[in-house]
Amino acid sequence: MSASDRRVREVFIELSDTLVDDFDVIEFLDRLAAHCSELLGVSACGILLADHHGALNLVAASTEQARLVELTQLQTRQGPCFEAFTTGHPVQHADLRNARARWPRFAAAAVGGGYLSVQALPMRLRDTVLGAVNLFSATTGELDADTITLGQALADAATIGIVHQRALARQEVVTEQLQNALNSRILIEQAKGFLSHSLDIDVDEAFALMRSYARANNRRLTDVADDIVQARLTLTRAPDRA
């Protein structure tokens, strides 16, 4: 195995390592931008990622000049990344000096920044496109097929990592919400038992008393139950005298 093959393998292993507590998507994509520049032999790399509204945002750039060009792309909503994101297919332009009719301000900004060709790769997983990776070159010409294949593989690997992390985060939110609901239920049952015993009423009447108080005072039932259990609130049979 050559040194370059070993380096590619190391990068893919690194990109797949998202199962960690301190996973940071921005740091993750910063590394991806640097790796793309290193492994693909391009001058710079920028990465745009869609937010929950579907709007693209700049999340990483390997150089400051690439960052400025990407900001121009976002401001004008024109450029290879927008096309790659919309179509889900790679977009390439071999000479940006001839792209002014296609992307007027983006092409001008890119050429002004020293970039003469560009290749945009969609960050996709099946039918889902999360964003796009922009590869800038200081020379004209198209990237060869092997380079594009490797670049798309890097983008796809990063996409899988992000999708996995998002799914994990959603699962953690659902689990937390479920646990909160269970905790609230336990607290309410404790408060019902406390009221039933202290007021010598049945459990159903105790619950109705708590619910009436919560509604009359525009409070959450769980908060009322917590106040009862913690002896911060005393209810009587008549809610208006509580």
Image (cartoon, rainbow, N blue to C red):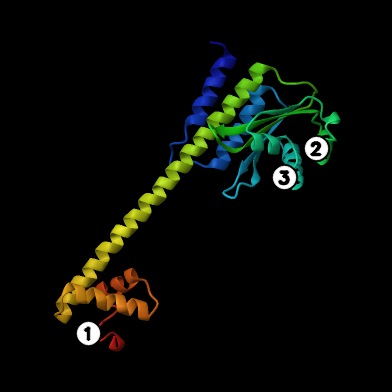
Q: Nearer the viewer, mark 3 or mark 2?
A: 2
Q: Upstream in the sequence, badge 3 or badge 1?
A: 3
Q: Disc 2 residue type?
A: Trp
Q: Which residue is mark 2?
A: 103
Please report contact status of discs 2 and 1: CB closer than 8 Å, yes or no: no
Q: Residue at x 51, y 29 (%)?
A: 14
Give how far apart the Cα atoms at labels 3 and 1 are: 63 Å
Please report contact status of discs 3 and 2: CB closer than 8 Å, yes or no: no
Please report contact status of discs 3 and 1: CB closer than 8 Å, yes or no: no
In the rendered image, residue 228, in percent from the top left (x then y), is placed at 27, 75
Q: Disc 3 residue type?
A: Leu
Q: Secondary structure at mark 3?
A: helix
Q: Secondary structure at mark 2?
A: loop
Q: In the figure, is residue 239 to the left or right of 62?
A: left
In the rendered image, residue 189, in percent from the top left (x then y), is placed at 22, 67
Give how far apart the Cα atoms at labels 3 and 2 are: 12 Å
Q: Residue at x 78, y 21 (%)?
A: 141
Q: Which residue is mark 1?
A: 237
Q: Disc 1 residue type?
A: Arg
Q: Which residue is mark 3?
A: 74
